[in-house]
Amino acid sequence: MPELSSSAAEAALDRSERPGRVSLLLLLAGLLVGAAVGLSFVANEQAQPIILGLLALLAMAGVFCLFAFAIGAIQLTGQGTRNDVTKAVVDAAPDGMIAMEEGGRPIYANAAYLKLAGSDTFTNLRPVERVFVGSPEVSEAVYRLAQAAREGRSLSEEIRMAPPPGGTAERDFAWFRIGVRPLPLPRRPLALWSVADITHERERQENVFQELQHAIDYLDHAPAGFMAVDPKGSVVYMNATLAAWLGHDLAQVGSGGLRLSEILPDDLGQVLVGGKGEPGEVRTDRFDLDLRRRNGHPLSARLYHRVAYGQDGRPGDSRTLVLNRSAGEESSDDPQQAAELRFDRFFNTSPVAVATLAADGRLVRANASFARLFGTLPRTGDGDEAGPPVRDFVVERDRHVVDAAARAAAEGRGDVPPVEIGVSAPVNRSARIWLSPAGTAGGAEGAVILYALDTTAQHQLQQQVNQAQKMEMVGQLAGGIAHDFNNVLQAIIGYSDLLLASHRPADPAFQDIMQIKQNANRAASLVRQLLAFSRRQTLRPEVIHLGEALSDLTLLLKRLLGERVELDLKHGRDLWPVKADVNQFEQVIVNLAVNARDAMPEGGRLLIRTANMTAEAVGALRLNGLPGADHVLIEVSDTGTGMTPEVMEKIFEPFFTTKEVNKGTGLGLSTVFGIVKQSGGYIDVRSTVGQGTVFAIYLPRHVPVPEADTAETPAEAALPAPGAAPAAAAAEVPKAPARDLTGRGTILLVEDEDPVRAVNARALTARGYTVLEAASGLEALQIMERREVSVDLVVSDVVMPEMDGPTLLRELRKAHPALKVIFVSGYAEDAFRKNLPDGEEFNFLPKPFSLKQLVETVKTTMAG
């Protein structure tokens, strides 16, 4: 819009102006003269009070004017001068302005708006709604503005008018920015409209956009590739040349549809965009590697990668120039250049990490495998420039070894032995490196060649094997101790039962004998924990639904956790059934919950989550030892203090505890480990110091098989489930009659422990049986050969010197195929069933047992 002259500024219209009037001043003067003339005709005595009254009124008016002037209510010329300046600025403003009263009545319009609207008086002055009338888009924009004016809101719109209104016929179209905002005057609310011609601004934007389109077109058709990647690994820009080389759709690039991991291996891509630098550093690296096309084929390329680091040392968006070095792209008749290309491809695609070092150990050049292993870019130094020392990528404890080997290689020694090191970043990685002289004087080409192999997986496997062997040895020791201890407890419990049978409850010794038996039972529970760790305890698996089992434990867990710890259960939908010993499963959850409580002394949150894990999901976890099949996950996580890696390596070892003396036995997690393993499951632990610990248990999904589920072994039929209440206690009314446990028949009792054999023989003899005693399997065979009367039942221990129980059974079956057998052992039934022929029938009684359980099992087996 052209500049306004002073004459144009004076053409503004303003209904709000209130100029002073000379007629009012003349009228006031006439009234005063008339009053004076009138008083001249009045007698002096009558005129004097009137004159005094007029003077008093004038004096009061003067005093009020002085006070008003002092507080600023009356000003002489300053306010008027300021108003004149403000009005002149608005009148001469280049943007059109019009003020509208409520009801659409204009009260002010500056000269720019009058020219735009083609008006010169209020009579023919058109408001904005009538000036800007055109296409539907213009009408909609003006309607939104008018609606905002009625609602007292501020709004701005940009419209295109073709042809433009008022005095601009030389142009076919024009762009306008129209705005409206309320003027909150106390008694006259107004809406101020502004109209600005932004045609030149739009033209400049279009020119810039066209230039940008040309630049993008030039970049897209450049003979080199270009891409930009953000710190999260998303490709935010890629030119058409690189997209064509890689076979990607350019429309999907830049909208989150392509990630760097699709072009480079994950570990190398993380190195490319990750890491830290010096604050404010701008780093440019050149390296050669293979990009991955969409069809999976490699693309040999040279990358010039630039990234700037912020004040916090973190990288920003990177810019990368890509040169295609595949066959046919850089063909040359120079054999040296062709050989260089072949060497670069071999160097950068080698699975062995290779680098050249300067004489002082600084990195000169490295391939992509070096970047994957050590977490640094495969940088190529230009000229005499070298990267950081290679010792910076080695853990502190191994740096002196690397320095010594590098010095030896730089001196020309060719017999430098390999070195085992730990990699500082990424963590928990290890490598074996070889250092040899390069055969040159150093400089830009390097003086030492470094070869490195990633031995992380090998070390982890070796640690797992060592841990498994250690656990197996401890398990064997625990199992042997438990077996021997069970025999001692069996004798104590047996003789206690004999004493209780001969004493009445009123006898003074009765309570002492009960204390002996109760403490023996407590010791037996510790033995069962040892057997659980060694996976030799007796389990009675059944099909259970984890949701119901955990719901039944809720009240118990809340009492154990206390008020400071919040319990949260999250059940997965439609959980698959699993097969496990429900009592042992409850012990696993309780042990984990108690440990979590102790790890949160100030309170926290315990989350127990269940979910179905398909075979694909299990395989994606990549946990060593976990088969890729359907499993059910039970995850127990806390917000406690967490564990260090050193503690995590020992948590499943028996008798290892971090608690104070007399606060724990160290058997809780070892029991959990044994129960889970014996149930065919897998347990994984993740912990962060200061954040908490997560125990993830994977139990295999149970697929029901009618024949297998309905079958019941004789041992299961003979014995109640551990912890189950007797039938009489379960149903108190009516009370079940006492069972007759007496019987007849000949029993061969085979037991190598004399006290156990003696007490069991006394108990069976007291019930009417004829008992033959044997201290070993060989002695039992001799008794069977000499015995003229047939033996009805053999009750044999499993673990015995010279001949164990399964071997004895195989020998007895040769001459007595129908002989009934009961095995007694502190080990699980599955521990020795594998040593028997398939289909072999026998009953089983786990140690330690009471004499009542012994005679009940004998009675049931004899009657069977």
Image (cartoon, rainbow, N blue to C red):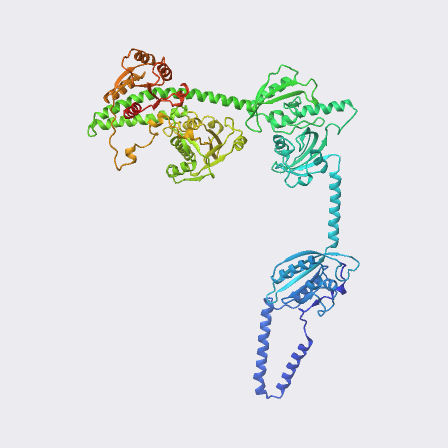
Instruction: Please give left or right for residue 129 compared with residue 486 in the image.
Output: right
Instruction: Please give left or right for residue 606 compared with residue 371 in the image.
Output: left
Residue at x 27% of width, y 36% of height: 732
Instruction: Please give left or right for residue 216 compared with residue 750 in the image.
Output: right
Q: Quadrant of the C terminus?
A: top left
What is the x, y in percent for residue 324? 72, 31
> Relative to 217, is 437 above or below?
above
The image quarter containing residue 800 is top left
What is the x, y in percent for residue 545? 42, 35
The answer to whether residue 366 shows anywhere in this view is: no
> Relative to 441, is 58 above or below?
below
What is the x, y in percent for residue 700? 47, 30
The image quarter containing residue 540 is top left
Q: Nearer the viewer, residue 545 or 147?
A: 545
Q: Nearer the viewer, residue 738 or 489?
A: 738
Q: Nearer the viewer, residue 233 or 710?
A: 710
Residue at x 67% of width, y 73% of height: 20
The image quarter containing residue 491 is top left
Q: How many marks?
A: 0
> Relative to 38, is 646 above or below?
above
> Relative to 38, is 801 above or below?
above
The answer to whether residue 61 shows anywhere in this view is: yes
Instruction: Please give left or right for residue 699 compared with residue 134 in the image.
Output: left
What is the x, y in percent for residue 64? 58, 72
Q: Quadrant of the N terminus?
A: bottom right
